[in-house]
Image (cartoon, grey):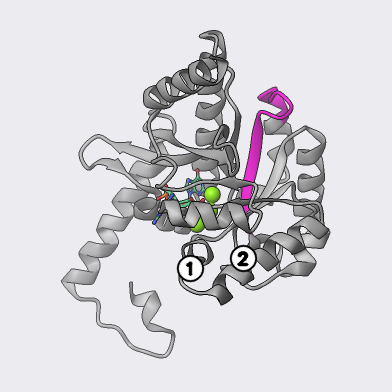
Amino acid sequence: QAKKLGRNRVEFFTPQLQSDLHAERRLADELRLAPMLRQIEPFYQIQVNAQTRHIVGLEALARWRHPVRGLLSPVAFLKVADEYGVTAEIDAAVLKRALADRAAWVSRGLSPPRIAVNISGRRLADPDLIDGLRALRIPRGAIAFELVETIFLDEPDEVVLANIAAIKAMGIDIEIDDFGSGHASLIGLVKLKPKRLKIDRQLVTAVTVSEEQRRLVGSIVEIARALNVEVVAEGVETEDHARVLAEVGCDELQGYAIGYPSCESETAALLKSAEASTAS
Ligand code: C2E
Ligand code: MG
Ligand code: MG
Ligand code: MG
């Protein structure tokens, strides 16, 4: 906490600060063990085709089933994970569980759509990433990686670029997450050639606010089209948002208006009923 106050200020180490730091350390220690104890699990949020509303994807979102604190969302632990260098392990645990869930769904006769998994900059810069992924024998088209704009903003390093190329070659889609929320990075977009981009929730929920905001999102769609990139709107909260986003040409929709993130068993039930209704 003292860090936030800046370099040039003297902070007295009060009992309050000391216990905050202590609590944070303890959380980090617990977090380090969490993947091994199978306390990290993905929740899944559906993504649908904007026109047909059929399920086309799932985003896997990390949840920490803490033995005492209950189910924790990533906002409660990702900052600590990053500070203590455990983010890559969390990412790996989520991917592994997502693949296991997917395999279980397939063995029960379901045809799961692609699963988008968030990947941190740290993991993307790991020289051992690709060997680790190969060992998982990921079926082509089964997985997409969502990465945030900022990762490749400043001159991306050699390892990151080589990893991205290898990931694509393995049949894993690259998606840009939270597009429009960081620094605009059209150069990055051209360099990276992602399969799709996800327009940030702030831009998405603004489409019903003004004609200008609506045109802005429409223009992002056009830029994506010019580059052969598909567009997903994230954070779609109302039916009005969904309608306007479909009108301006977004390919896919994700958000509370479409479905809330849910656990493995609820997701399996959802996939089952969706398959039953499209088959009939
Ligand atoms: P994100 O990748 O942009 O994921 C979308 C977040 O917005 C999720 O929060 C989701 O529950 C929430 N959301 C979905 N629809 C709506 C909506 O209509 N309205 C609103 N207000 N929110 C909505 P969540 O699960 O708390 O995740 C927060 C962030 O944590 C994610 O943002 C992602 O950046 C990060 N994250 C989640 N799982 C992982 C992971 O496994 N690895 C890494 N590195 N980051 C992760
Ligand atoms: Mg994401
Ligand atoms: Mg996102
Ligand atoms: Mg977001």
**Taking 98 as reference, is 191 left or right?**
right
Residue found at x 39% / y 75%: 3
Q: Earlier in the sequence, mark 2 or mark 1?
A: 1
Q: Point out the image quarter for the N terminus.
A: bottom left
Q: Classify mark 2: helix, strand or loop.
A: helix
Residue 165 magenta-drawn? no
Q: CA distance from mark 2 to mark 1?
A: 9 Å
x and y, in percent, of residue 270 in the image? 43, 25
Q: Residues within 10 Å of mark 2 (few under 14, many from 20)?
A: many
x and y, in percent, of residue 124 in the image? 67, 49
Residue 243 at least partly seen: yes
Label placed on residue 206: 1
* Residue sitting at the far left: 15
Region in magenta: 134-148
Label placed on residue 217: 2
Between 127 and 58, the one nearer to me in the picture: 58
Residue 146 magenta-drawn? yes
Are the residues at dot 2 and dot 1 in contact (C-beta closer than 8 Å)?
A: yes
Residue 182 at least partly seen: no
Residue found at x 40% / y 47%: 256
